[in-house]
Image (cartoon, grey):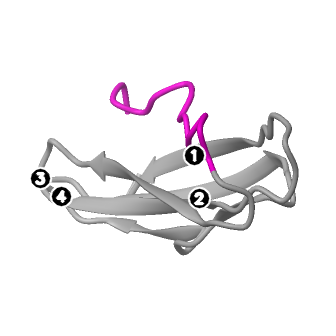
Amino acid sequence: MDQIPKMIDLGSACTLGQTYKKSLMIESRTPVSFEYDITVTKPHPDIQILSELQGEITGMQTTNVEFAYLPLSFSTAEAEISIRTSEFDS
């Protein structure tokens, strides 16, 4: 899972009340399927995860995790998530 960035910038010149979306692609580079579990460790009301928080990454396939940012004030919004994976049949 070395392709997961430590930070995703959802926009620095955002308009109040306008939603901004970004996707994070998670890829299995092996023929083995993985389960994933996303936990929001530091929530922020302006930042939402639109994708399922749990699922499967099929071997040699990708899945997208989509985020949305809806700024309601002129301030920096920060949220933290944890993505945990586990190999099937292990």
Query: Which residue is at 38% across, 33% downward?
Result: 1
Q: Which residues are magenta?
A: 1-14
Q: Earlier in the sequence, mark 4 or mark 3?
A: 3
Q: Main secondary structure of the magenta part?
A: loop
Q: Earlier in the sequence, mark 3 or mark 2?
A: 3
In the displayed structure, 67 sits above or below 80; it is below
Label 2 to label 4: alpha-carbon separation: 16 Å
Can you tell which mark lies on residue 31?
A: 3
- Real-space Cα separation, disc 1 to disc 3, in angstroms: 19 Å
Left/right placement of residue 76 relative to residue 2 reads right
* Whole-number angstrom distance, CA of label 4 to CA of label 1: 16 Å
Residue at the image point whose x is 33% and y is 30% from the top: 3
Residue pointed to by mark 4? 59
* Viewer-proximal residue among 73 and 89: 73
Which label is found at residue 84? Answer: 1
Give the crowd class for mark 2: few <14, some 14-19, many >=20 residues within 10 Å: some
| Label 4 – label 3 distance at C-alpha | 4 Å
Within 10 Å of disc 3 (Cα), the crowding (few <14, some 14-19, many 20+) is few
* Amino acid carrying mark 3 in the image: Pro
Disc nearer the start of the sequence (1/2): 2
- In which quarter of the view is residue 57 placed? bottom left
Q: CA distance from mark 1 to mark 2?
A: 5 Å
Whether residues under marks 1 and 2 lie with C-beta atoms below 8 angstroms apart, the answer is yes
Front label number (1 vs 3): 1
Label whose residue precedes the other's in the sequence (1 or 3): 3
Question: 18 above or below 3?
Answer: below
Q: Are marks 2 and 4 in contact (CB under 8 Å)?
A: no
Closer mark to the observer between disc 3 and disc 2:
2
| Residue found 63% across the figure and 56% down from its top | 38
